[in-house]
Amino acid sequence: MNPAPQAAALLSAPNPFARGYDNLHIERLLLITYENDYPPCFRPLHDSQAQLPDNELQLFPCLFNDDFALISEGQSISDDLDERCPSTGLVRQVIYAVMGEMLNERHHLGDLYSLEEAQVMVHRLSFETGHYSRTWEISTAHLTEEALRYLERRVGDFDSRPTGLLFEPFALADCNGVGCKLIGTPWTDDNLEKIEGCPYSSLRQEQLDTGTPATLVNVLYLAALADVRLLIFDPDATVLNGLAIFDE
């Protein structure tokens, strides 16, 4: 199997390292009711009316299409925009939707009824760094004996040079653990094209060609894809649900 299908196979199940959301933001939406036989719909307000406060939106009639809505009462609407909005309705509620991204997928996290409430929610979901913890400690059971020996050999060789493979092992002698510093995360094709000039499949093949065990490559990929920067393997740490186990 070549590197690309192997990487794709790893993502057939949810990534156990994925935590938190990126690009948290707030979208103001209008909950619109229209013909009796249809459920309510949600539309953003057109940019030309973005300055209108909530009290000039709620319970006002509107025009809308699949992409946006326009308040029709007391507002000047150009002929062009009027022609683009074939449907009419009533704005029942102004909604502040909190949106986020995880592994480049867009997620709708919740709806609030004021900008202030939505801002509080975003603040509580965020840290000042913009990320949840980027350091993980997991059990060595997630590595084969071959992978553990590889890491121990790397950290035990004082003359070894940097791997140049976007990860650097380090020893934790006090706990019999070993860690990896992940570089250039997340290991998405887009990000690696920017910093390395090649997709992930090329990095993976290079890691394998230089003798990095496949089980270690797989774990590092999942962690790096979730933007983990420090990954520690400790025999006394708990296992991570959803990640392959090789030694109970």
Image (cartoon, rainbow, N blue to C red):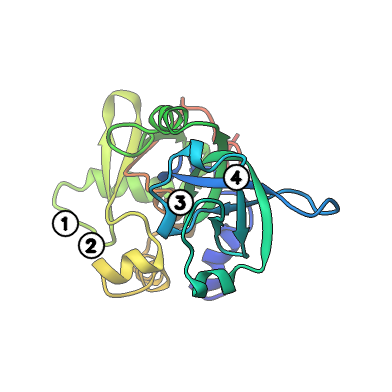
Q: Is residue 79 left or right of residue 12?
A: left
Pointer 3 or 1: first along the chain? 3
- Residue identifier under label 1: 161
- Pointer 4 and pointer 2: residues touching (CB < 8 Å)? no
- Residue identifier under label 4: 60
The amino acid type of the residue labelled 4 equals: Phe
Residue 213 visible here:
no
* Residue at image coords 57%, 39%: 58
- Residue identifier under label 3: 146
Q: Which tag is nearer the camera, tag 4 or tag 3? A: 4
Query: In the image, residue 20 lies at what x, y percent?
Result: 46, 38
Query: In the image, residue 22 lies at what x, y percent?
Result: 41, 46
Query: In the image, residue 132 lies at what x, y percent?
Result: 38, 35
Residue 65 visible here:
yes
| Residue at mark 3 to residue at mark 2: CA–CA distance | 21 Å
- Residue identifier under label 2: 164
- Out of 144 and 232, give the one closest to the viewer: 232
